[in-house]
Amino acid sequence: MRLHRRYVAALVAAAALTAAAGCGSGSDGDDTGGSSTTAGSREKVTVGFVTAGVNLPFYSAMKCGAERAATAEDVDLLWQGTDSIAASDEMRTLQAIQSRNPDGIILVPWDSNAFVAPTRTMIAQGTPVLTVDGSLSQPIAPYLGTDNLAAGAQAGEALGELIDGRGTVAILTAAPGNEVQNKRWRGFKAAIERRWPDVKVLEPQYVGSDTAKAATATTSLLSGNPDLAAVYTTQDASGEGAASALRAAGKQGDVKLVSYDATPRQVQGLKAGTYDALVAQNPREIGEQMVRDAGRMIREDAQLPKQQYVPSKFLTRENVDDASTEGFVYSGC
Amino acid sequence: MALGLRATSSAVWVTLLCALLVAIFSVLSPEHAFFSQQTFTNVSLSSAQIVLLCVAQAMLLGAGHIDISQGGVIVFSSVIGGTVVQAVTGVGSDTIATSYSHLGLAIVVAVAAATATGALIGAANGLFVARLRLNSLVVTLATLGIASGAAQLITNGANLSGLPTSLQTGFGIKSVGGWVPLPALVSAAIVAIVWVAFAKTRFGLRTLAIGSNVSAAERAGVPVGWHVVRLFALSGLVAGVAGVIDLTRFATTDIGGHQNDALAAIAGAVIGGTSLQGGRASVGGAIVGALLAVILQIGLVVLNLSPFYQTIAIGAVLLVAITVDRLLKARKDS
C-alpha cells in the first residue's frame, strides 16, 4: 500500500500542475476580457460552435473566418467538435458545451433528424441556434452555407461537357444517411440525367471519409466499366483516393475527375492535371458570416432568413489562378 | 479467488481516477460549470449505451471470447425497430405527421423486435463459435459487416425519418427530475441484473472457468457450448437495447455510425481489469472503464480544450490508467 500511495501522490502532483497551467490560461482570458471593454462599448457574448469531423480542412478554414469575426464582434467563441462523424458523439459534445451556458449556438448538424429535438429545447430555453453547413429536417432554425443541390447540379452540367455527353460516370460519396452528401450527388445526378441523357450514371459507392476505400472502389469501377468516362466525388478524402487510383491505372486525364471541396492539395492537383474541376465552397466566408449572424441573433434578436446561401465556385484550370479564387482554398489562418 | 481480486483492484483504481478527473474538471471549468446537473445528465445519457456494451464484452472476454459485431447489431436492430414503428403507424420516411395512430402498440412491438433481433444475431455468433469452433474475432467481424450492410440495404442508404419526436421527448432525452435520463435507468437495471448473475450465481463461475481452461471446464461438467451461446446472445441483446436507445435518443437511425463502438467497449472492459486472455472479468470495472472515457470526452469540451488536443489527452489518460494499474499489480505480486 505504501507504493500505492506514492503513485497517487505522483498523480495528484501531475493534476496540480495541470491545474496551475489551466489557471494561467484562465487569467489570460480574463485580461483580454478586461481590455475589450475599453475597446468596444458592447458587452461580450459567448457563442458555442459544435461540429462532427472537426479535423476536416473545411472546418479549419471556417475557424479562421469565425475567429476573425469573433474578434471584430466581441464574441467569445467556444470552438468544439468530435473527430468521428457519429451523431451520438456530436450530441455529447453539444450537451457539454451547453453546460457553459453560451448566449447562442452555431451547430453543424451531421444528422438532419437527430438534432431537431435538442435544437427545439435550446430555442425554447432562450438560446438562439444557427445551423451551418448542414440543415435540419424541420425548419426550426435558420441555415447558412452552400447550396449543395445547386452546386452539385453545376458540377453535373460541367462534367457532361468535359466528356462530350457520352460514357459512364461513377459517384463516390461518404456515408449513407448523410443528407448534405446526398444532396451533392443527387443534384449532380439529376442535372446529368436532365442535360446529358446519353451518359450512364452508376449507383453511388459509399467510401466514408476514407482515401484507401475510395482508391479501391475506383480501381474496381475501372475494371468493371471499360467505358468509364468520369468520376465525381462528394468530398475531399474520396477525391484524393480516386486521384491516386486513376494515376496508378494510368488513366489520369482519360477518365475525368471532378471533386467537391478544395483543400490546398486538391488545388495543386487541379493545376497539375490530377483533377479536372473542383466544387469549392467558401468556408472562411461562412465562418465570418455565421459569427456575425449569431451575434445579431443574440444582441438584436434578429430574425434571419430561413436559408442563406454562400456562393460556391466551380474551379477549373482556367480560373484557378484568378485572384478571386483565393478565399475558396480550404486552409487555416 | 486471487484472480477475482486482481480485477476488483483495477475497478477501485479506475474509480479513483474517475473521481479525480471529476474533481479536476470541476475546479478548472469556468464557474465550475462541469460540476452541474447538466454534466451529470450528459454523462449518464452518453454512457447509457457504451456501459451496456462494455459489461457484455467483459463477460465474453472473461470466457475467452470477443464480440466485434456490437456496433453493427446496434444499427441493424435500430433499423428494425424504426421500420416497425413506421409500419404499424403507417407513417413513412417521406411524410411528416403530427399525430400517429397505434403509437403505443408500435413502440411495444418495435422494442420487442429490435431486442429479439439483437439477441438472435448474438446467438448466431455464439453458434458459429461454439458449434463450429470458429474464432470469435473473425466470426463477429463478419456479422459486423453483414448487419451494417443489411441495415443500409433495408433503408436504401438513407437514415429513417418521419419517426415521432415523442420517442425523444417521452423517453430518449427525458430525465427523471431533470437528473437521471430514462435510457440510463434502463441501462443501469440491465447492468444490475448481469452483475448479480455474475457475482452470485454459477453464471459468473462458469464464465471464468471457460475462460481459464476450456477443457478443465468441460471435464468439470460445465455445458461450455450452451454457455458460450448464452454469452453471445447477451452481447447481442444489449446491443439491441442500445439500438432502441439510439432510436429514441435521435428519432432516427445512424446507419453510418457505431463502427467503433465494440472497440471502445473492449477498451473500457480491459481498463476496468478484465483480461483479454480470459479467466478474469469485472462488471464494476467495465462500468467505470466506460465512464472514464465519457467523463474525459465531456470534461475536455467543457474546459474548451482544442479538439485536436482532446484526442491526444484522451489517449494519454487511457495509457496512464493501464500503466499505473499494471505497476500496482506488479508491486502486489512481488
Image (tube, coloured by chain):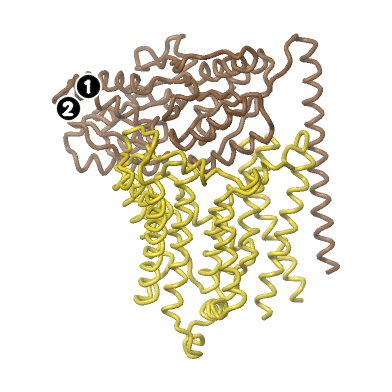
Three-letter code for the amino acid on which mark 2 is drawn: Val
Q: Is residue B265 above or below residue A135?
A: below
Q: Quadrant of residue A205?
A: top left
| Front residue of this view, candidates B164 and B226 | B164
User: Is A320 situated left or right of B297 in this image?
Assistant: left
Query: Which mark identifies residue A160?
Result: 1
Q: Is residue A89 above or below residue A272?
A: below
Q: Quadrant of residue A261?
A: top left
| Front residue of this view, candidates A169 and A5 | A5
| Disc 2: which residue | A199
User: Is A193 situated left or right of B114 in this image?
Assistant: left
**Which quadrant, please, contains the N terminus of chain A?**
bottom right
Query: Which mark identifies residue A45?
Result: none
For the point 60% across and 68% down, the residue is B274
The local secondary structure at tag 1 comes to helix
User: Is B117 situated left or right of B301 in this image?
Assistant: left
> Mark 1 belongs to which subunit?
A
For the point 52% across and 40% down, the residue is B169
| Front residue of this view, candidates B149 and B41 | B41
Q: Position of residue A94 (x, y in %)?
A: 58, 36
First-in-chain label (2 vs 1):
1
Residue A327 in sight from this viewpoint: yes
> Mark 2 belongs to which subunit?
A
The letter of the brown chain is: A
Q: Are marks 2 and 1 in contact (CB under 8 Å)?
A: yes
Q: Is residue A141 above or below residue B204?
A: above
Three-letter code for the amino acid on which mark 1 is drawn: Gly
